[in-house]
Amino acid sequence: MTIQELNKIAQQGADLINVRRIVREQAEKLAGNTGYRKQVLVCGGTGCTSSHSLQVIEQLEKSFKELGIDDILIVKTGCFGLCALGPIMIVYPEGAFYSQMTPEHAKTVCEKHLVKGGEVVKELLYKETVHADGSVIPFSEIPFYKHQMRIALRNCGVIAAESIDEAIAAGDYSALAKVLTEMTPDDVINEVLASGLRGRGGAGFPTGRKWAFAKASQGDIKYVCCNADEGDPGAFMDRSVLEGDPHCVLEAMTIAGYAIGAHQGYIYVRAEYPIAVDRLKIALKQAHEYGLLGKNILGSGFDFDIDIRLGAGAFVCGEETALMTSIEGHRGEPRPRPPFPAVKGLFEKPTILNNVETWANINPIITKGAKWFSSIGTEKSKGTKVFAVGGKINNVGLVEVPMGTTLNTIIYEIGGGIPGGKAFKAAQTGGPSGGCIPAKHIDIQMDFDNLVAIGSMMGSGGLIVMDEDTCMVDIAKFYLEFTADESCGKCTPCRIGTKRLLETLTKICEGKGEPEDLEKIKDIAEQMKSSSLCALGQSAPNPVLSAMEHFGDEYKGHIYDKTCAAGVCKSLLNYHIQPDVCKGCTLCKRNCPANAISGEVKSAHVIDTKKCIKCGQCIQHCRFNAIVKK
């Protein structure tokens, strides 16, 4: 393929997605010159697919055939972000946002809305897109979207995920064309340096500096790697980019190869991401067919190729040296640093490794300029950050906001607040390597340095929200269970330290904790942080130490008072029936599996704490809120 051919496809394809871009970015009701009367976008990402979005597409195709509809385009896209509402279907040019779709709902939309002269089926729309008077507003204006700025996710939910023509129309490969025809390798690196882009995989190391080190390293062979392992519990940012816009990663890796003098790249992706893997394979095949990978790319004389390597789901393989060891065919274990990968990495050759989100920012930096990118965010954290928001929050899903956006905005403006009106207690960032942000810091500006300052970290972008019913000791134990299980065992501080920490936390949650356990935890944590081989062991104590710092009273309550204020740790709980509230309906007695409840009809009942197994069935069946955990 030549530059002229690439531009021709971009121009022809632009009309296909013009209507989506206009409605999404400007909220204007314009159809564009698409050749179709309407376009129906259905999420084909993992979240919506697991909620049967493919069956929704099948029903649309069936109904189109039955109703004789042949002027509407069905597009299977990537993730729209609002995962809690899947399956999601959006109809353009109206921008009608249908949520929680079923095949039957799809049939209804076809019969009432998609036929000529039809009208939007308001009762099936996402409630936030319908005013009290019944009028419909574009979904881009609802709180979840209007506070966001999508750069890494710019094409997710906009283009057909398996179409290279739509990817080109949306701007993919335009940066590669510019680089290969107008820029030297040093120009590319200097542009990335000037942008201020820091790695989105966790540590936040300046991307341009990493590339510069690799370019300066001597070697006849160099490599470019993509970390798509994404092992943090609750994180799914990278998966969504690969599912919705895989070409942006291929393009960025090729640009990096040109910049440092590499001709081979590897994408390391976990096998548990089957949709992402399939779309990567499709994208690689298409890029080869179009001459955008392989020999003499765009007639420039530059050669670059990319292969996929599947990981088996080991969390430690998210660490760069362990990932490279796994690609080499060995057991995924970390290696001592230095030497760093930019000097001696994959197959002992100079290597750069960035995660998916980092790669997704390269095209806009090259096409729009470093000055534009660096104008977004904070002084030391440029651009945007994608967060996978989950836990006790109404709008579970993917959120991309400028660096420096407050946690309060993410939780209450974008996330829709806490279910049931309960109070926000804390948020965990950085997964098993991160720490908690207590309610007193809810107005913190989310960037690399601010989070580190309060004992947390950005990490890859997992953001787990916790409400007043969360036990912070139990949460710390949950993350230690994960890291103890995922430790590769190569170094003693991590292999033994995670187990000792977990044993101590389990002891505390079971009501067997002793005052000296708090100092024991700090001592073990200090040894792990200073002497573990890789970041898994060095950061594994973070959730525990962070919770102890901000919620020390909960630890003391577990140890000294043998109580769990949140009512989570079963060993520290007793169930009690309030006699002045109990109506004697006998529902709790009839549903108690341990026969621990006694009492007559219309008389207050009593729980025998010695028999009670603390299963909670009594509370679930009580209609009068007469049973409390003490």
Image (cartoon, rainbow, N blue to C red):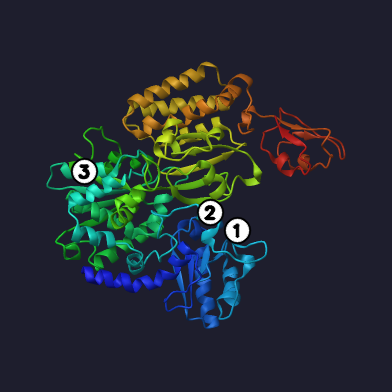
Tell me how far mark 2 sits from mark 3, CA to CA.
38 Å
Q: Amino acid at mark 1?
A: Glu
Q: Position of residue 431 (x, y in %)?
A: 45, 39
Residue drawn at the location 62% of the way across and 60% of the way down: 127
Q: Is residue 439 above or below residue 520?
A: below
Q: Is residue 356 visible?
A: no
Q: Which residue is mark 3?
A: 212
Q: Which mark is residue 128?
A: 1
Tell me how far mark 1 sits from mark 2, CA to CA.
9 Å
Q: Which residue is mark 2?
A: 144
Tag 1's secondary structure? helix
Give the side of residue 196 with respect to residue 563, left or right. left
Q: Position of residue 63 (x, y in %)?
A: 54, 77
Q: Which mark is residue 53?
A: none
Q: Are marks 1 and 2 in contact (CB under 8 Å)?
A: yes
Q: Residue furthest right?
A: 602
